[in-house]
Image (cartoon, grey):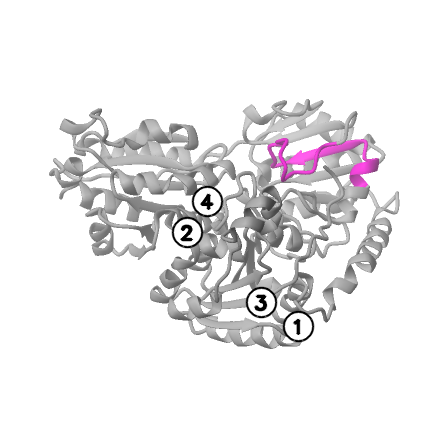
Amino acid sequence: MNGDQVLAKILKAEGVEWISCFPAQTLINACSVEGIRPVMCRQERAGVNMADGFSRVNNGNKIGVFTMQVGPGAENAFGGVAQAYADSVPILLIPGGNPAARQGVHPNFEAVPNYQGITKWAGNINMVERIPEMVGRAMTQLKHGRPGPVLLEFPGDVAQAEFPGTLDYKPVKVRKSGASQEDVRDLVTALLKAKNPVINTGQGVLYAEASDELVEFAELTNIPVMTTLAGKSAFPETHPLALGTAASSGTLMAARFLEKTDFVLGMGTSFTISNFNAPMPAGVTLGHSTNCAEDVNKDYRAEYGAIGDAKIVLQQMIEEVKRQLGAEGRGDVTGVRAEIQKIREEFMAVWGPNFTSDEVPISPYRVINEMMANVDIDNAIVTHDSGYPREQIVPFWPVTKPRGYLGWGKSTQLGYGLGLALGAKLAAPEKTVINIMGDAAFGMSAMDIETAARSNIGTLTIVLNNGVMTHYYDHFPHATEHWGSNKLGGDYAKVSEGLGAYAERVDNPDEVGPAIRRALEQTRENRPAVLEIMTKEEVNIARYWR
């Protein structure tokens, strides 16, 4: 066996089912022979994004893999990897590498030193004998601690070299740990003494597959739960204790409870200060549970902490609550459920008219409402692009199942959502997968609609076309007024049809629902669908904090 064949067999043993790729690596053919499906993207960043979406939907239990050409391929993939690093997504990157005789020679691009700032770990497979060792190290990094991208540079001379002896590779097992009992006891005791506690939930709960435990803990203690943008879907938003998401946009329920809370428990979140996280109130006691110790006290000082896997820690906390309060926990002693419902009704009274608007151009909130009416939310995965699409849908899409929504934003690259949706569909082909993007994002990524068509990946892309580019035009009014070359435009439905998708352009609000139904029929036949919906310039965003 040569190095390509060895690596392909190891990836197969690790449960890799497909790889996203762009030529020209001979590893692609070796993977195909081994039964690993290659999905060829149109540009490298989209391929990374596809691996990202696949890993997210599988909660890191199955890892998305992207392989790319030495030099230009690795250079082009950089943005997608930076996004995955910012959002803590475990993906395996396998760029080609320069042969030993050409390493360290300018201007040859070397992935390891250049990617070290945006990967959790990066290594070079410098000898064919070391392939099992290096893949084992990479997989150990991918399966433990804070998730993140891992890179294995695979030089062409190593790929073609003969592997000596017999391959004996055992897949890496996942090891998990809980928190100390003393830390759990102290945290739960303080939490139960608080008058108005809130649980702030991040995507660590999703990666730990701990949503059931979170629901049980919230019900035992009657503590309301809000989520970060990345954590949206970790707690069912139809639950009477759900406050919704608190990100760059969010719900009135989350805002009101943050205003009066005296204790915030961060569960599976990094508590990072960001434009895409609601700030924690000053003077409030914080508890922090994470599997990543370096996040504790990073941006906020936590009075209480419990380091460990979110599922195990929540199980420990549930047992501690039962020890202190009894098996039934405590009832709704403060009337918090009724309070949440009252605020939710107030919230929707303000925003409800937007969802039934007959305005032309169409209100994006009317589009969201038609989606809710025509999509089986329990069996859907929805994501967004950056800008207005994200801000408008995040507070209102009532996600009910873990990973029914893929929220992202620590980095906020335009065009990211399409590749994310394609990877999500590959991870869960039985689900309806929808990406909502703006017209500017379409220009960044739309060629990979052809990837979906060629590869029979039946996603629905909704383009909210308002032509305002999230008001970035405001930054250069003179250039826009005098040079006339800054306004984006195009017939995106026609472009999508040319790329092999089912496509419609929708101008009438009454046609949005029927168009969604027609598009979903096409996706069930494994054909991608694109709806270009001509929307109004809508600057009204549910934003309650800065």
| Residue annotated with mark 1 | 509
Q: Nearer the viewer, residue 536 or 203?
A: 536
What's the amino acid at mark 3? Ile
The residue lying at 20 percent from left, 42 percent from top is: 6
The residue lying at 58 percent from left, 67 percent from top is: 533
Q: Is residue 269 above or below residue 510?
A: above
Cα distance between the residues tagged 4 and 1 = 39 Å
Position in image of residue 445 (x %, y %) = 43, 54
| Residue annotated with mark 2 | 50
Q: Quadrant of the N terminus?
A: top left
| Residue annotated with mark 4 | 60
Magenta range is: 257-280
Q: Residues within 10 Å of mark 1 (few under 14, many from 20)?
A: many
How many numbered marks have been drawn onto this rendered protein structure? 4
| Residue annotated with mark 3 | 533
Q: Quadrant of the C terminus?
A: top right
Cα distance between the residues tagged 4 and 2 = 14 Å
Residue mark closest to the camera, 4 vs 2: 2
